[in-house]
């Protein structure tokens, strides 16, 4: 009698779990998922260096970054304490921090830096046949020392905007395997 009850239990259990029995494994969705992951990881990978490092700048670090096409580099270094535009000295950091704006209703503008950026923007406009009152499409990459004061950074960004640069990239030092290459954020 025990064997008949055992057989009946086995029959009920088999009938109950029959719908969960796996007859075949469809790998197509799994392979599609892996292909999508590989595709997105390869397309979002950053490649190469964006621009040369400005001497004396100790960039802050970041974990994420994307390369930018050709750009104009504005360096704000602590050693030597100077502001450079495309490798040419514009002024000292102290002079930039202490300068007062001569533009009405724009107290943050740094006059000497504004002049240098405006001349650069005008040359880009002239080369691309862009009207004088329109912003330029070229990216201005700001490489500032990690110890730079935020009030000076705000003034630099306002000066760049007023000079005609609408695309500004703040660069940081990528950490990890490729720690020497600057990356935009």
Image (cartoon, rainbow, N blue to C red):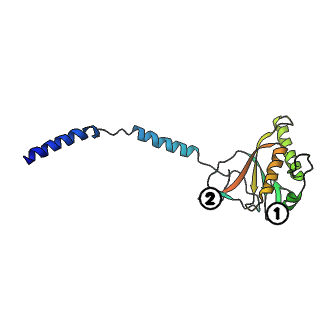
- Residue, x 78% and y 54% (percent of image)? 153
Q: Nearer the viewer, residue 157 or 19?
A: 19
Q: Nearer the viewer, residue 105 or 185?
A: 105
Residue 89 sits in quarter: bottom right
Element type where label 2 sits in the image: loop
Element type where label 1 sits in the image: loop
Q: Which residue is mark 1?
A: 81
Q: Give how far across and how far down residue 31 sits, in percent.
A: 43, 41
Whether the residues at callouts 2 and 1 have beta carbons within 8 Å, the answer is no
- Residue, x 13% and y 46% (percent of image)? 6
Numbered tag placed on residue 6 in the rendering: none
View extreme (left): residue:
1
In the image, 149: left or right of 176? right
Dot 2, crowdedness within 10 Å: few (<14), some or many (≥20)?
Answer: some
Q: Give how far across and how far down residue 90 sits, in percent.
A: 86, 55
In the image, 153: left or right of 30? right
Q: How many marks?
A: 2
Q: Is residue 63 above or below residue 120?
A: below
Q: Is residue 24 above or below residue 78?
A: above
Q: Give how far across and how far down residue 7 sits, in percent.
A: 13, 43
Q: Give how far across and how far down residue 68 sits, in percent.
A: 69, 46
Q: Which residue is mark 2?
A: 175
Which numbered disc flags the more N-terminal residue, 2 or 1? 1
Dot 1, crowdedness within 10 Å: few (<14), some or many (≥20)?
Answer: some
């Amino acid at each position: 009698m025990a064997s008949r009850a055992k057989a009946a239990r086995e029959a009920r259990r088999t009938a109950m779990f029959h719908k969960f029995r796996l007859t075949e494994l469809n790998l197509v969705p799994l392979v599609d998922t892996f292909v999508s992951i590989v595709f997105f990881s390869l397309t979002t990978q950053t490649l190469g260096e964006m621009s040369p490092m400005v001497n004396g700048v100790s960039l802050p670090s970041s974990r994420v970054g994307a390369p930018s096409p050709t750009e104009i580099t504005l360096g704000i270094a602590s050693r030597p304490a100077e502001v450079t535009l495309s490798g040419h000295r514009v002024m000292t950091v102290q002079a930039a921090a202490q300068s007062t704006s001569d533009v009405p209703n724009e107290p943050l503008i740094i006059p000497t830096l504004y002049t240098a950026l405006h001349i650069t923007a005008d040359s880009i406009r002239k080369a691309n046949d862009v009207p004088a009152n329109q912003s330029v499409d070229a990216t201005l990459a700001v490489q500032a020392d990690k110890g730079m004061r935020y009030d000076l950074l705000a003034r630099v960004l306002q000066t760049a905007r007023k000079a005609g640069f609408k695309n500004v990239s703040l660069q940081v030092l990528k950490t990890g395997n490729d720690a020497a290459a600057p990356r935009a954020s």
